[in-house]
Amino acid sequence: LIYSILFLILFYIYFYYFLYFKQCCTFLWGDANFPNGHSLKGSINSGIGKATALALAKRGARVILACRSQERAEAAAFDIRRESGNAQVVVMRLDLGSLTSVRRFAASFLKTEPRLDLLVNSAGVMGPGRTEDGFGMAFGVNHLGHFLLANLLLERLRRCGPSRVVTVATVLPRLGRVDFPLLASRKDLVSGDSAWSVFQAYCSSQLCNVLFTRELANRLEGAAVSCYSLHPGAVHTCRGLGAWLQLLALPFAKLFFTDAEGGAQAVLHCALQEGIEPLSGRHFSRCTPQQVGARGRDDAVAKKLWEVSERLTGLS
Ligand SMILES: NC(=O)c1ccc[n+]([C@@H]2O[C@H](COP(=O)([O-])OP(=O)(O)OC[C@H]3O[C@@H](n4cnc5c(N)ncnc54)[C@H](OP(=O)(O)O)[C@@H]3O)[C@@H](O)[C@H]2O)c1
């Protein structure tokens, strides 16, 4: 019985993520275009972000790689320029775990870059510790950093419309929750530092990304800026794992998960697909709009999170 259950689970994962996901994404490349667009990719020196930046550069976009490590970003930019033949790939320093860095980055971006057509929020951390400003790592980087960045660049996005804000999240928002009293007392969405708390903090930050997108769409109603959150599928980037875990996980991951290029298809769909503007604010999975759980559809919580985030980032 145990073997049968195991077999069924593996078959389900194989079918759902490997076959179905890959098939759904093959149509993307055909109809999307990005002539002379200007895009800003948050954290792209690896994984899904780098694959997305490469695809945008191949379409002729001027791509700004916003990364915390100058060295890794320069290496990624070199690869992207070489593979795409596009010299318009620029590196700028951005640490989403520091509100000062986000402000410095935005000021410098607005001074030097006249256009912004697409903002892709793709950085993501799952780990212990605190940001420079004392927030829980996942909440501070995955939500607050992106929240402040998008707000500081919103006017430029409006002026360059039609433009888009695309935020990578996961299917995990269903497991997250936004506890406002806890946030006020601990500057975090979880109360402990155990491995389970770290995982919960990650899920909750992903829920924040979904709620942020929802409220942003409400606030942008009537503007030529649309926004989407998306789950890129199960992607074998495996970077957060230690060397031994990577060795163990890689064969399994390669067999059942898609690669970074496959994950990038989901981002590119929300970034480039024509005609999805009426779906602004929605969450996508495998290139189709997905119904998120009740917590991800709670407009009152989304509004409150926005107001609290404005206070926490010094915007109000
Ligand atoms: N892989 C999956 O199966 C999967 C599934 C669902 C959702 N996602 C989401 O997809 C996104 C990309 O994931 P990935 O798989 O491509 O992982 P990844 O390769 O680890 O990419 C994460 C990126 O975030 C950047 N980052 C982390 N902390 C930062 C900070 N403080 N400031 C600026 N950049 C920072 C990292 O930059 P450094 O190089 O400096 O560390 C890295 O480039 C994440 O948001 C993740 O949550 C992934």
Image: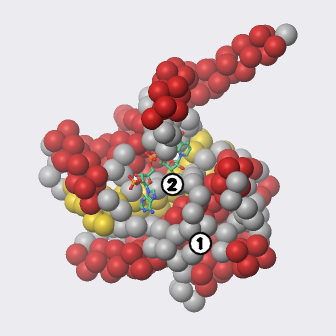
Residue 18, compared with residue 3, is above or below; it is below
Q: Amino acid at mark 2?
A: Gly
Q: Is residue 151 left or right of residue 176?
A: left
* Residue 80 image point, x, y percent: 23, 45
Identity of the residue drawn at 68% across and 50% down: 195
Q: Nearer the viewer, residue 304 or 46?
A: 46
Q: Amino acid at mark 1?
A: Phe
Indicate which disc residue 26 carries: none
* Residue 15 seen in the figure: yes
Residue 187, compared with residue 275, is above or below; it is below
Do the residues bearing badges 2 and 1 touch, measured as CB atoms within 8 Å? Answer: no
Identity of the residue drawn at 66% across and 74% down: 187
SS assignment at label 1: loop
Position of the N terminus by quadrant:
top right
Does any atom of ligand 1 lie closer than 8 Å to the CB of label 1? no
Indicate which disc residue 124 carries: 2
Q: Is residue 253 left or right of residue 171?
A: left
Q: Which residue is mark 1?
A: 135
Q: Is residue 45 left or right of residue 82?
A: right
